[in-house]
Image (cartoon, grey):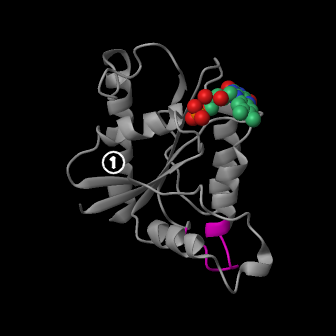
Amino acid sequence: PQYRIAVVVGSLRRESLNAKLAAAMTRLAPPEFGFGRVEIGDLPLYNQDDDANPAPSVVRMKGEIAAAQGVLFVTPEYNRSVPGVLKNALDHASRPYGRSVWAGKPAGVMGISPGAVGTATAQQHLRNILAYLDMPTLGQPEVFLQFKEGLFDADGSIGEASRGFLQGWMDRYVAFVKRQSA
Ligand code: FNR
């Protein structure tokens, strides 16, 4: 595909709702876009002492972000913020100083929770971090999803009730990435 989007999921859980959402969103993308999930569960805890000698998982992850034309963050909310595993990945790929791979990559942000707040507070914290990392981030539409039966259909695609809304998000994000890449 002409445009590769690195998908970063903020949950390592096997049955993660956010991982399911990320996979379902991928199916709404047009053919010139390829969405691929980036593994962050194998990264060590960030330690500045290792900047000169990063673990292979860190080198791989940074390479995947660097090669992408955009980044989609799909994250749960933990204690009203982003999970530590996501912050760890953000920190890793922002270093060594001056060699961040995030800068300039157009970002999309979304999340799902069993709770009614729908990850809104985590997303606000994440948007602050992305602003500092110099990532242009799609502002609208915001996607705060509360899990409901039928959100995903039997084959894991977005169910009928939310498909129009989430296809609309995808169309806006695709146009945003193309504008940023032009
Ligand atoms: C949660 N959960 C949660 N939910 C929420 O809406 N706001 C919150 O602040 C929190 N805080 C929180 C902290 C911790 C440590 C855990 C483990 C969970 C519940 C969370 O939304 C729920 O477990 C989701 O299913 C997690 O997302 P995944 O793993 O399904 O993608």
Q: Name the quadrant of the N terminus.
A: bottom left
Residue 52 visible here: yes
Residue pictured at 69% horizontal, 86% vertical: 52
Quarter assignment of residue 146:
top right
Residue in the foreground of this view, choosing between 48 and 96: 48
| Tag 1: amino acid | Val
The picture places residue 7, in percent across and down from the top left corner, at 45, 52
Residue behind label 1 places its C-beta within 8 angstroms of ligand 1: no
Residue wearing tag 1: 174
Residue pictured at 52% horizontal, 67% vertical: 61
Picture layout, residue 162 above or below residue 91: above
40 sits left or right of 141 in the view: right
Residue furthest to the front: 14
Stretch of the chain drawn in magenta: 92-101
The picture places residue 81, in percent across and down from the top left corner, at 73, 39
Quarter assignment of residue 97:
bottom right
Q: Does the magenta run of residues contain 100?
A: yes
Picture layout, residue 154 above or below residue 52: above
The picture places residue 158, in percent across and down from the top left corner, at 35, 26
